[in-house]
Amino acid sequence: MDLVALLIDLSFEINMFQSFFENSYKRANNIEDLPWYRDYPPRFLTEVIQENKEPSRALDIECGTGTYSTIIAQAGYEVIGIDFVAAALDMARERAADAKVSIQFQQADACDYQSQGPFDLVLDSGCLHSLKEKEKYRQNLLSWLQPGGQFILVHFNKRHFFDWRPIGPHRWNREQVEEFLGSQFQLRDYHEEIGKVPFPVGPTALISTYWFKRV
């Protein structure tokens, strides 16, 4: 494939990805209608929050409707939530207002976002596995997260060679994730479980949650 064809293919996939999320939010009458909606925190988030007693900063990447941003803010963190879908951020601001917490929500792409200072906690629940420009994301992550900071990643795992779908998240096994992040990230804990996901991505997927520390 030549460079022009590759760029056209990449642009098409990115546009499909963006359209899927934008249309999902437009069709949703409320947040419970979203196929990825969860009203509970991802594994390890509560432990990270309880462990860090000092005033801290957190970044919620592709924060969606702000469920996790609000949980972190209620624990006393200064929180920034980013997402590229304006409708998602409108829902997130409404959620934060209802919970009476202050959160800075910004419309931004994870591969382009530049922070004004480092964070003690970075949460990625389902962003990395949907990106094409993963190396750019990794470089940004190193700039976002200060040494000693905590990184929680929720990522679709690859169960076997035939575990893939023509659309949806790029599935990586545990070894691939650890190799991608490299020696600057130390795995503190790991959990995996089979979860229900909507068709055609599903009907099920092996969902892995990682707790890394930046060293």
Image: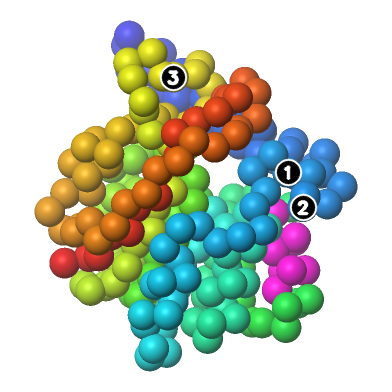
Residue 91, numbered circle:
none
Rendering coords of residue 112 (x, y %) = 43, 53
The part of the image, by quadrant, that contains residue 203 is top right
- Mark 1 closeness class: few <14, some 14–19, many ≥20 residues within 10 Å: some
Query: Please, is residue 41 above or below residue 118 in the view?
Result: above
Q: Amino acid at mark 1?
A: Leu
Task: Tell me the quarter of the image containing the N terminus.
Answer: top left
Residue on which disc 3 sits: 164
Rendering coords of residue 50 (x, y %) = 42, 80
Of all residues, the one furthest to the bottom in this rendering is: 54
Q: Which residues are magenta?
A: 88-96
- Estimate the spatial distance between the alpha carbons at disc 2 and disc 1, rounded to whole Å: 6 Å
Of all residues, the one furthest to the left in this rendering is: 183
- Mark 2 closeness class: few <14, some 14–19, many ≥20 residues within 10 Å: some
- Estimate the spatial distance between the alpha carbons at disc 3 and disc 2, rounded to whole Å: 27 Å
Rendering coords of residue 45 (x, y %) = 45, 66
Residue on which disc 1 sits: 34
Residue on which disc 2 sits: 31
